[in-house]
Amino acid sequence: MIKRIVDFFGGEAYARQRRRLFYLVLVLIVVADFIVRREHAEYLWERVPGWSAVYGFGSCVLLIFVSKFLGHQGGLMRREDYYD
């Protein structure tokens, strides 16, 4: 059982199925966000359907770009043979 799961998530043969599964999960999360009742939302943006998905995606993209910038331009990243 574990071997099948590891092969599914690690093997190139299942890349297309894996991508479709992840897209399906993303769509289900956004659809579920439209179903949730928003009676107790404190802020205006919390009432917008899909806001949490957009905010989470934007935060992840921003985090990646900031870390890449700090690594390459900020001098945090070193050559591969730096310690040799």
Image (spheres, helix red, strand yellow):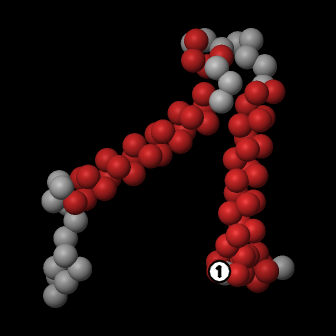
Determine whether, in the image, residue 62 is placed left or right of residue 83.
right
Q: Quadrant of residue 20?
A: bottom right
Q: Secondary structure at mark 1?
A: helix
Q: Is residue 15 above or below residue 20?
A: below
- Quarter occupied by the C terminus: bottom left
**Badge 1 amino acid:** Glu
Q: Quadrant of residue 75?
A: bottom left
Determine whether, in the image, residue 75 is placed left or right of residue 9.
left
Q: Position of residue 26 (x, y in %)?
A: 69, 47
Q: Position of residue 27 (x, y in %)?
A: 73, 44
Compare residues 24 and 40 and report the one nearer the observer. 24
Q: Which residue is label 1 attached to? A: 12
Q: Is residue 62 above or below residue 80?
A: above
At horizontal 76% and vertical 83% (from top left) the residue drawn is 3
Q: Is residue 13 above or below residue 43?
A: below
Q: Residues within 10 Å of mark 1 (few under 14, many from 20)?
A: few
Determine whether, in the image, residue 51 is placed left or right of residue 16.
left
Q: Position of residue 45 (x, y in %)?
A: 57, 17
Q: Position of residue 15 (x, y in %)?
A: 67, 73
At horizontal 68% and vertical 63% (from top left) the residue drawn is 19
At horizontal 39% and vertical 46% (from top left) the residue drawn is 63
